[in-house]
Image (tube, rainbow, N blue to C red):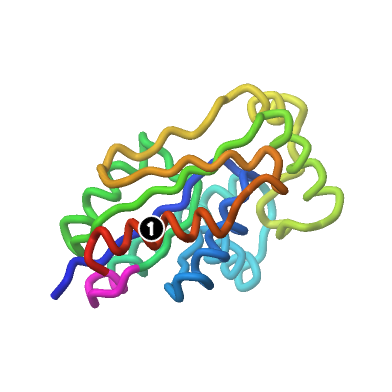
Amino acid sequence: MQIPTLIIVTGHPATGKTTLSQALAAGLRLPLLSKDAFKELMFDGLGWSDREWSRQVGATAIAMLYHAAATILASGQSVIMESNFRVDLDTLRMQRLQAIAPFRPVQIRCVANGHVLAERIIRRVALGQRHPGHCDDMSPADLEVVRTRGDITPLPIGGPLLTVDTTIPESIDMDAILQWTIAQLRAQGL
């Protein structure tokens, strides 16, 4: 059986990961696993209350994300995973996933100016564009962290990496990103 590809779409909140990964899933005709999708299903079934509960649900959503990915990859199917993957937490998780369901990694890292990200988060909250269970109603201190933390670090798991600057959404060439990803899949024999 051919080794499947795991396309990892990562970035801080509000960098456009979901939009990009949905376009890739449609263009590549691959399943998409999203941490926030799992989280929101749990919020709808279990309710929501505060940020601590959101973190607990998030931890379970991550476990579900990796479990679903392992199941799909073990069947030989390539898959897209989307989340704000963190080097300190997800490197080991990816290594464990690789051990139980071997894959070829391709990473797409979404980045954007911190001030733009803070404004996107504020706008999402004001317009009700995010599930209230995420508790995104951020304090000034939280927003300052968003503005100043810098870009998310890619996971040190090998494979090709594409960095997409989403600061100006109109400048994003989704077709070029799709073509780059197709080229990576072809290079891996898929």
Q: Position of residue 61 (x, y in %)?
A: 47, 60
Q: Residue at x 67, y 45 (%)?
A: 171
Above or below, 19 against 109 in this view is below
**Furthest-left residue in this view:** 1
Q: Residue at x 29, y 73 (%)?
A: 71
Hey, which quadrant is residue 119 in on the image? Answer: top right
Task: Please state which of residues 125 and 159 is positioned toward the viewer in this rendering.
Answer: 159
Of the 4 image quadrants, the one containing the C terminus is bottom left
Asked which secondary structure carries label 1, the reply is strand
Where does label 1 land, which residue? 7
Task: Please state which of residues 183 and 15 is positioned toward the viewer in this rendering.
Answer: 183
Describe residue 24's horizontal placement relative to residue 183 as left or right.
right
Q: Position of residue 102 (x, y in %)?
A: 18, 61
Of the 4 image quadrants, the one containing the N terminus is bottom left
Q: Residue at x 63, y 48 (%)?
A: 172
Q: Residue type at mark 1?
A: Ile
Give the extent of the magenta segment.
Answer: 71-78
Task: Please state which of residues 26 and 175 is positioned toward the viewer in this rendering.
Answer: 175
Describe residue 25's horizontal placement relative to residue 184 as left or right.
right
Q: Position of residue 14 (x, y in %)?
A: 65, 45
**Furthest-right residue in this view:** 126
74 drawn magenta = yes
Q: Residue at x 34, y 52 (%)?
A: 106
Hey, which quadrant is residue 149 in on the image? Answer: top right
Above or below, 31 against 146 in this view is below
Q: Position of residue 147 (x, y in %)?
A: 67, 26
